[in-house]
Image: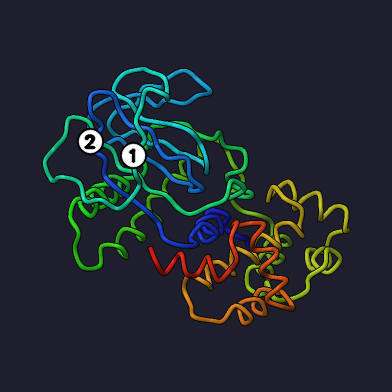
Amino acid sequence: MRVDLITATVNSLRVGRVQGRRVTEAGPTGVRMPVVARLGFHTIRAGEGWLITNTSAPVRVRAGDVIYASPLAEHGIARTPCSLDELLTITMDDIPASPAAADFEFLCATYPAQPTAGIGLLRNLPDVFAFTPDYAGHPGLSALLAMLSDDMTQAAPGSEAARSALIDLIFVHILRHLQHSTSAEVTVEPGLAEVLDLIHDHPEKPWTVDQLSAVASMSRSAFTRRFGTVMGAPPMAYLIDWRLTTAARLLQETDTPVAGVARRVGYSTPFALTNAFRRKYGVAPSQYRRAGLAR
């Protein structure tokens, strides 16, 4: 048994509502992306432009290129090299674009995420970077991007569900590319796999490092070192993050009362969950649920 970290990464990011739009109104200069707690990607669909950041020189991007952006990463996409301050910030609201072809256009897709998102697989990636996917090796990616572009161009029944599914699939392709290009570790050995399964399936249990290291058939110190190397966080920090991620998903996807959510993710009282939840998401669980329903 081995745990697939790509699947675990996508599942951990799928909290709340994805956003996506097709940008065709770049104007004579380009656009700056809003600085928000969302992780995502852009893909250039037509024309050529430049990835602009405050930390490195402009990088040329062409049709087919993908830009990965971590939460709160400052960046923009411009027609010509420039500074980030020269670009106007756009909104990421789901605005259907004109069906007419544009000489320069790109797709944007984002997940709600904290700056610490991606413990494990994404932790060593730069904040923002561009790359050219292997479309020959992954021929389905072109079809997925075309379908996402069509969905973002016209609103139709089921569009939100289709968009979420397409963005998930495209993000999986992006993670596979990063796996091959960086030789990232995307599976873990059986002992750690069993530990991760227990944490993911039963976050409500009062796990201790001693219990988890016994499941992994490792000494406490060896288990803690190996877990931190693979997942990018100590076992208890990962457990807490997973509990809160699960709580956020339950708040968005079910009508379970906050007290029930607290019990399902291992907190003895709603008060204990609220304190931990505020530290991660900045709002109380009830506020997080209301905000999700209002979007």
**Rendered image: mark on residue 90:** 1
Q: Quadrant of residue 213?
A: bottom right
Residue 74 pos. (x, y %): 48, 33
Name the quadrant of the N terminus: bottom right
Q: How many marks?
A: 2
Judge by depth and name the residue closer to the eye, 54 or 142.
54
Are there few (<14), some (14-19), or many (20+) residues within 10 Å of tag 1? Answer: some
Above-or-below relation of 258 to 133: below
Judge by depth and name the residue closer to the eye, 34 or 103.
34
Residue at 32%, 65% (x, y): give it.
161
Residue at 59%, 69% (x, y): give it.
247
Residue 117 pos. (x, y %): 58, 50
Above-or-below relation of 2 to 92: below
Above-or-below relation of 286 to 126: below
Task: Tell me whether circle 1 and circle 2 mark residues in contact (CB < 8 Å).
Answer: yes
Q: CA distance from mark 1 to mark 2?
A: 9 Å
Residue at 63%, 50% (x, y): give it.
119
Tell me which amino acid carries mark 2: Glu
Residue 159 pos. (x, y %): 25, 62
Element type where label 1 sits in the image: loop
Residue that sits furthest to the left in the current view: 100
Residue picked out by circle 2: 25
Element type where label 2 sits in the image: loop
Of mark 1 and mark 2, the one earlier in the sequence is 2
Are there few (<14), some (14-19), or many (20+) residues within 10 Å of tag 2? Answer: some
Tell me which amino acid carries mark 1: Ile
Name the quadrant of the C terminus: bottom left
Judge by depth and name the residue closer to the eye, 204 or 4.
204
Residue 13 placement, left or right of 135: right
